[in-house]
Image (cartoon, rainbow, N blue to C red):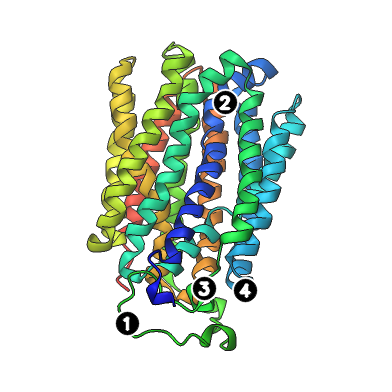
């Protein structure tokens, strides 16, 4: 019966996960678009704006390792659905905040929900696609977060003109509620329990009864902790997260209040960023299936460092700013799924989600640190130059660390 189906269920999984990432990253990256108007009307400084985002990240990195483990233990469908429900409520409440403490508390709850919308999602997609098709599948999947960011950049000025910044959160919270039902009904945690092979698998057909009777093999965590590749990739992840979030979160504010661009022109940076992310994930991620994740990450991090240096050099030229933000975004988009795909390439599949979850604190600490440092340097000096220079150096560090990762 399965062989006669025209549509492999892997594509249904991929489509649903695409929308999950669209919603997740419309909120996560869209915060940088909402930030200037939000802090202006609430009377917050940039450090406070960074602290709100950091409350999200602190919750996210604390809980994600547990979420990754629970995904391996109980399957992706219940984890994603429950987390998306929490996410939707919290995002909706973000539109009601008036004080810094409430903004931090509620955005922290958004981070709790978001723990089920990255590691479980990319783990689920990798399990439904054959090993040599993972880059291809993750490329399609990852257009979701680029499109989410691009949409926020284009739609947010319209929301401000016709409503106010609060409605951006209301709209996104409503979309998350719709996806709760979709995930609960249509997701399947893995192909084995569904009695099918991953899409693109060319090996012998699997035993349809194995999914119900076999228990997953347990891999001791000590094996993970003793593996130098876990630490090298993790610290490289930290460095590139510091580099990219320092620019992406504050680039609209930089353009609007340091370069004196209009809200429309400044917000359009997010649209350029999102569109170029889509270009990157559709080209670089499939290419990584052939070049290898390590080589792809090294080249990508090097180009990101060059783009960040160029943004500093072009000064007030908004045309050149658009150009280099776009170039950086081509490699920004593939960064997160390529690091996630390293879990499947370098570690056993039984602990794939656990590894991705264990790497999340590296990513989150990098993002948290860059928000505080960038916000404080901007408040203290009135410009972003010093902060962006540090971002450039961290991209180079992320590149160098990957050079020491040995082959599988």
Q: How far, Cα to Cα, is label 3 from label 2?
A: 37 Å
SS at badge 4: helix
Q: How far, Cα to Cα, is label 4 from label 3?
A: 10 Å
Does residue 374 sit above or below 140 in this rendering? above
Taking the spot 30% from the left edge, 15% from the top edge, the residue there is 317
Crowd around label 2: few <14 · some 14–19 · many ≥20 (10 Å): many
Question: What number is the disc on residue 258?
Answer: none
Does residue 90 sit above or below 348 in this rendering? above
Q: Which residue is mark 4?
A: 73
Where is residue 399 shown, x and y percent of the image? 32, 51
Where is residue 169 shown, x and y percent of the image? 64, 31
Crowd around label 1: few <14 · some 14–19 · many ≥20 (10 Å): few
Q: Can you tell which of label 2 and label 1 is closer to the viewer?
A: 1
Question: What number is the disc on residue 203?
Answer: 1
Question: Which residue occupies the foreground of this view, 292 or 201?
Answer: 201
Taking the spot 43% from the left edge, 38% from the top edge, the residue there is 147
Taking the spot 64% from the left edge, 72% from the top edge, the residue there is 74
């Amino acid at each position: 019966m399965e062989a006669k189906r025209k549509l492999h269920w892997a594509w249904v999984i991929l489509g649903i996960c695409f929308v999950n990432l669209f919603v997740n990253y419309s909120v996560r990256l869209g915060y940088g678009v909402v930030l200037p108007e939000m802090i202006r009307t609430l009377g917050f400084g940039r450090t406070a704006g960074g602290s709100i985002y950091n409350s999200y990240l602190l919750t996210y990195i604390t809980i994600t390792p547990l979420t990754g483990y629970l995904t391996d233990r109980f399957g992706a469908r219940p984890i994603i659905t429950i987390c998306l429900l929490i996410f939707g409520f919290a995002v909706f409440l973000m539109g009601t905040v008036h004080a810094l403490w409430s903004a931090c508390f509620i955005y922290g709850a958004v981070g709790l929900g978001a723990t089920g919308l990255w590691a479980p999602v990319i783990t689920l997609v990798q399990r439904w696609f054959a090993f040599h098709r993972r880059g291809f599948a993750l490329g399609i999947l990852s257009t979701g977060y680029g499109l989410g960011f691009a949409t926020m950049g284009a739609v947010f000025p319209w929301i401000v003109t016709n409503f106010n910044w609060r409605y951006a959160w209301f709209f996104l919270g409503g979309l998350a509620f719709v996806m709760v039902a979709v995930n609960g009904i249509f997701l399947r945690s893995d192909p084995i329990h569904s009695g099918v092979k991953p899409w693109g698998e060319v090996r012998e057909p699997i035993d349809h009864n194995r999914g119900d009777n076999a228990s997953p093999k347990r891999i001791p965590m000590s094996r993970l902790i003793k593996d130098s590749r876990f630490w090298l990739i993790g610290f490289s992840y930290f460095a590139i997260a510091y580099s990219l979030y320092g620019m992406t979160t504050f680039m609209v504010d930089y353009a609007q209040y340091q370069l004196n661009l209009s809200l429309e022109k400044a917000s359009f940076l997010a649209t350029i960023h999102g569109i170029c992310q889509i270009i990157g994930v559709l080209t670089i991620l499939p290419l990584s299936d052939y070049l290898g994740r390590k080589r792809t990450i090294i080249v990508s991090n090097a180009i990101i460092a060059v783009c960040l240096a160029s943004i500093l050099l072009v000064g007030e030229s908004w045309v050149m700013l658009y150009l280099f933000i776009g170039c950086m975004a081509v490699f920004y988009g593939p960064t997160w799924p390529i690091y996630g795909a390293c879990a499947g390439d370098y570690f056993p599949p039984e602990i794939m989600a656990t590894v991705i979850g264990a790497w999340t604190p590296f990513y989150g600490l990098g993002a948290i640190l860059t928000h505080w440092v960038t916000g404080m340097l901007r408040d203290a000096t009135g410009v972003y130059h010093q902060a962006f220079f540090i971002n450039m150096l961290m991209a180079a560090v992320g590149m160098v660390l990957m050079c020491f990762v040995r082959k599988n």
